Amino acid sequence: MSGAVQGQKFSILFNWFDQDCDGQLSAGDLQATAKVFAQVARDEDHANVAAIHAAFGQWWQLLVEHADTDGDGQVSRTEFIAAMGDSVTAPEHFESAVMAIADAVMAAADTNADGVLSREEYVALYEVLGVFPEQSAPAFDRLDLDGDGVISHHEYRTAIVDFYLSTDPNAPGNYLLGPIAA
């Protein structure tokens, strides 16, 4: 069951990253995904936009190194799911590949620069990313672990860790992209 939960999440992520919908990930797909994420930033927020692009570039390099087993410059769903479990989520890569994106995205989405995400900021962030408010609003409540009405940097990072590393299907972070299939 635990491997199945992570496999489901990584498959959802693959679909999300496969921007050209050709069933393979390429450098272009991750660049396009970075552009989508960068849309949450204010026009003058060049630092977070650059950080988002750099982190997705790092992620692509990890995928090429650890997932592109046939050397064709593309990563299949099977290769992606295996690499996510074995390499990208490994402690030596997770911070630079995944958490760097999370930190830059949270900073970019924090439009009033108060260090937390309000419900409105959170819903707007995920709407840009293609998650409907009907899914992101309830997810906000799950991620607001202390119930103070905002998502702190720590709570957001905890949610990202849950999504990528937790094998518990009910972990709050599993709702970042909408509920995973049961």
Image (cartoon, rainbow, N blue to C red):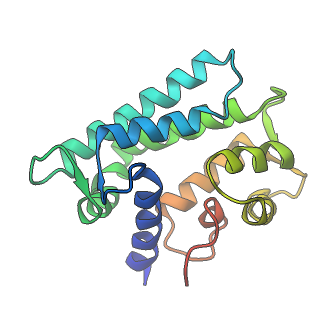
Question: For this view, does 113 lie left or right of residue 160?
Answer: right
Say left or right for 17 vs 173: left
- Name the residue rendered at 42%, 63% in the picture: 10
Total labels drawn: 0
Compared with 2, 12 (above or below) is above
Residue 179 at x, y percent in the picture: 63, 72
Q: Is residue 109 above or below residue 157?
A: above
* Residue drawn at the location 61% of the way across and 60% of the way down: 177
The reply, left or right, for residue 182 in relation to residue 4 is right
The location of residue 57, given as percent across then percent down, is: 36, 32
Foreground pick, 140 / 20: 20
Residue 83, by quadrant, is bottom left
Question: For the point 44% across and 32% down, which residue is it?
Answer: 55
Specify whether residue 95 is in view: no
Name the residue located 56 percent from the left edge and 77 percent from the top edge.
169
Q: Position of residue 172 (x, y in %)?
A: 67, 66
Name the quarter where the N terminus is drawn: bottom left
106 vs 91, nearest the viewer: 106
Nearer to me, 5 or 178: 178
| Rendered view: 178 above or below 87 | below
Q: Is residue 70 visible?
A: yes
Which quadrant is home to the C terminus? bottom right
- Residue projecting furthest to the left: 70
**Can you name the residue that lies furthest to the right here?**
148
Q: Position of residue 152 (x, y in %)?
A: 76, 43
Is 62 located above or below residue 161 in the figure?
above
